[in-house]
Amino acid sequence: MPIGKIAFCTAAMIVAATNFADARPDTRKMTCAQTQALIQSRHAVVLTTGANTYERYVRQFGNECDAPYVPMVDYVPASDGRCMVYRCEEPAPMVPD
């Protein structure tokens, strides 16, 4: 294989790898309104919330959670403070008193 083709393939792989590294939006770099709008527009999205943390967040009203999970309130860091979002969680069992 000629050196030109090898160099081209290597460069293409480097560009693809750096583009995919930024594929997950970071809530710390967005305002709360931007974060909430992104979730609403995509219905469900995996967001980076810290240096080594990420989570899947969903719309409040929708069918993005599999049963028995339901959208529950959570808070993520945003550039303008804490931001209320929803993620799928199993509801606590209701035990009668």
Image (spheres, rainbow, N blue to C red):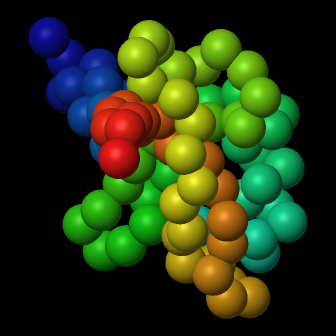
Q: Is residue 70 above or below residue 56?
A: above
Image x and y of residue 48, in percent: 44, 59
Residue occupying the point 30% across, 25% down: 9
**For the view shown, which residue lies furthest in the front direction?**
97
Image x and y of residue 57, in percent: 55, 43
Visible residue check, residue 45: no
Q: Is residue 6 above or below residue 75?
A: above
Image x and y of residue 16, in percent: 41, 35
Q: In terms of image quadrants, where is residue 67? A: top left
In this rendering, position of residue 53 left or right of residue 46 = left
Pick the front one: 10 or 20: 20
Residue occupying the point 58% across, 55% down: 73
Pick the front one: 15 or 5: 15
Label count reads 0
Pick the front one: 27 or 92: 92
Q: Is residue 53 above or below residue 6?
A: below
In this rendering, position of residue 75 left or right of residue 9 = right
**For the view shown, which residue lies furthest in the left direction?**
1
Image x and y of residue 5, in percent: 29, 20
Residue occupying the point 59% across, 19% down: 64
Q: Which quadrant, please, contains the N terminus?
A: top left
Residue occupying the point 30% across, 62% down: 53
Visible residue check, residue 3: yes
